[in-house]
Amino acid sequence: MNTKLLGSSLIISGTALGAGMLAIPMVLAQFGLWWGTLLMIFICFGTTYAALLLLEATIKSGGGLGLNSIARKTLGKGGQLLTNGLLYALLICLLMAYILGAADLVGQLSRSIGLELTTAQSQIAFTLISGLVIAGGTGVIDKLNRGLFFVMIACLALTLVFLLPDFSLDNLARVTNDDHIELIKTSAVLFTSFGFMVVIPSLVSYNHEASDRELRNMVVIGSLIPLVCYLCWLFAVVGNLNPAQLGELKGVGDLIAAFEHHSSWIGTLLSLFTGLALLTSFFGVAMSLFNQNRDMFNQNRIVTYVLTFVLPLMGSLFAADKFLAVLGYAGIILVFLAVFGPLAMVYKLRLANVESERYSAEGGQGMLIFSLAFGGFLLISQVI
């Protein structure tokens, strides 16, 4: 795999590795490692296969910078409108959340150097500066993301090293909650933690010279990296905190505070990791929205830059509470967009025997049925 494809895999991983990194132990640890690990592997498998279906649809339809062109070619005008509506709702809400989260980090950083910024100023500064990176194109994002990603993984590795001396094998077998219905309810958190599919059309266009097999490997590797990171972190948290400590965790701050007695460096490392995870996720989502706007409106980079960031920034400035409530539905939107959408695209393409010699996701009809059942399972888990 060349460096360009590797960088693309890291964009996939970076988009997935966001707040889920710290949220997953808090929702899964109570059910024990065995069931938590099985559910996470199942969700990763389902989301990866859905991503491969989207890859197949992108390749066979001739590609495009965003889902707009692919949906039009495969699902017609009605499917295009529905896909665009779901995609814009999801990406704008996610970008709002990232802008709000990043503004807190920018505010803390500015205060540490003696510069006092209001929340609104921090949001505007982050959006304008990071937006320039997005406007620079996928190549710029790729190169910057590689560096950020390796620093992020180094932070995780160092944290695991600091935690290793206090690791307890006895903790791994403990289960404080054996309610499997409650376990299934966590599927929404896990699914959104692997939500990287929106970047695939952009990366296929970026790697236009790559073979179908190389693009497939790009997606698989990009999806496996977050799984390994999530599992390592879950084992570290459960192995170092007893059930009483796990029961007291109410948020990310509590989780970081619970580890600070192990080493003074852990809080700093986890805070740095959180900031980088947020930034790499922002890059992936913003790149998808920027390219979607280029694909849909066919304007120059300046106009596309404004179209991409004006709504998320306005939402974070003036209507944060309302829009953050919408984030509760992001998982449902993602199911239709990232599972049912690619499934419908591929079904129509295979039915019409379009570009049959190009890449087809493995498993044939049986795996299409699995993907349909997987999407149904995710919907049920969110309304159960």
Image (cartoon, rainbow, N blue to C red):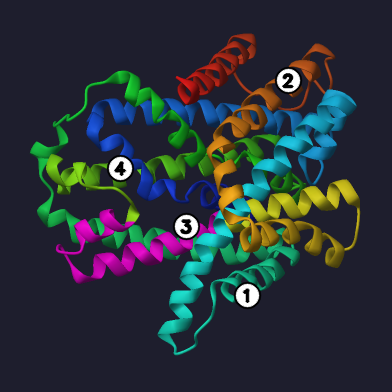
Query: Can you tell which of label 1 and label 3 is closer to the viewer?
Result: 1
Q: Secondary structure at mark 3?
A: helix
In the rendered image, residue 247, in percent from the top left (x then y), is placed at 20, 41
Instruction: Report how far apart the C-alphas of labels 1 and 2 lie in the structure.
Output: 40 Å
The residue under label 1 is 125
The residue under label 4 is 26
Q: Secondary structure at mark 1?
A: helix
The secondary structure that most of the magenta stretch takes on is helix
The residue under label 3 is 277
Q: Earlier in the sequence, mark 1 or mark 4?
A: 4
Badge 4 crowding class, 10 Å Cα cut-off, few under 14, some 14 to 19, many 20 or more, is many
Q: Secondary structure at mark 2?
A: helix
Q: Nearer the viewer, residue 12 or 84?
A: 84
**Is 114 displayed left or right of 209 in the figure?**
left
Query: Can you tell which of label 4 and label 3 is closer to the viewer?
Result: 4
Q: Is residue 374 magenta?
A: no
